[in-house]
Amino acid sequence: MMSLGIEVKKGRIDRRWQQEDLAEAAGISRKYLSQIENDRVDPRFSIVKMATLTITDQRGWPMPAPVRYTRWEDIPPHLQTRTQLARQGLRPARDQGPVATMRNQLRPAAPYALYDISQAIPKRQATPAQRAALAATRDRAYALRHYGTCSICGDTEVPREDLERFGQCGPCAEAEEAALRTEHRAEAVEWARKVLADPHAVVLDTETTDLDGEVIEIAVLTMAGQTLYESLVQPKGAISAGAAAPCTG
């Protein structure tokens, strides 16, 4: 009893087809067909059936060599791909094989199979339950692409942009930032209390030409308010009106 691979190979040789011819007509690569013929792989039934249909018709008679096209404009209107048939609500019949192929530079290793539209049959219409399931699947796929889960609160509808930016959802990021501000403020208050309680601490006081301007006066004072040092500094720029002391005389 011949193996499956040998039967496919015998049918191809009897038809005087090259491996490239059968692989192109069946919509598979020549390397994969070679593995099938040498029983190196266990192909799906649909692939073997397609390969068989491309070299014999339903009565077992050899079919003519496949027609090859390299330009879409050369293909007659009655030959269409599965996608083109689907757009018209059609699909290849159960035992309908491709009658030609379209190979171009964009897909040199995976040619398009072309089917005779006159042999195609209407696609089965999806039931309301199937359409609802399909819509739910699309929604889940969309959610997986655009949303993620917050590792803090477990919210599953967090935009992925927020997760990439903050590593968590917006509310959790805001709460964490508020907690850090509170912690930093408490640390600053504690540091100030320790400094003010130190009798040897001094305060450096400065006056500037503007909010971000040059220093024009320096003073060093004790915690009791005693001035230890005070001096004016000649600025290089002009003193703003807001920084100048108002005249009282």
Image (cartoon, helix red, strand yellow):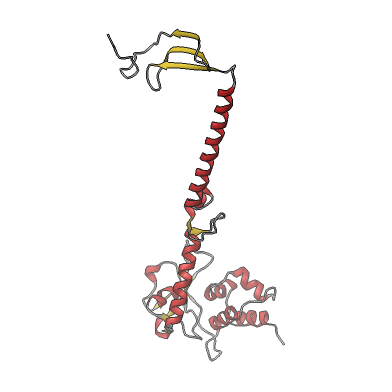
Is 106 or 249 nearer to us in this picture? Answer: 249
Residue lying farthest to the left in this orientation:
249
Q: Position of residue 101 (x, y in %)?
A: 47, 73
Task: Say which residue appears at 28% left-offset and 11% top-offset.
Answer: 248
Is 173 or 18 nearer to us in this picture? Answer: 173
Is 183 or 125 nearer to us in this picture? Answer: 183
Task: Say which residue appears at 49% left-offset and 59% top-offset.
Answer: 147
- Work out whether residue 91 can be spotted: no
Q: How many marks?
A: 0
Q: Position of residue 214 (x, y in %)?
A: 41, 16
Residue lying farthest to the bottom in this orientation:
59
- Work out whether residue 75 can be spotted: yes
Task: Say which residue appears at 62% left-offset and 73% top-offset.
Answer: 33
Q: Position of residue 120 (x, y in %)?
A: 42, 84
Q: Quadrant of the C terminus?
A: top left
Q: Quadrant of residue 202?
A: top right
Task: Say which residue appears at 37% left-offset and 78% top-offset.
Answer: 88
Q: Position of residue 56 (x, y in %)?
A: 55, 85
Q: Is residue 33 left or right of residue 99?
A: right
Residue lying farthest to the front in this orientation:
224
Is residue 57 shown above or below 82?
below
Q: Quadrant of residue 30?
A: bottom right
Q: Quadrant of the N terminus?
A: bottom right
Is residue 124 shown above or below 22?
below
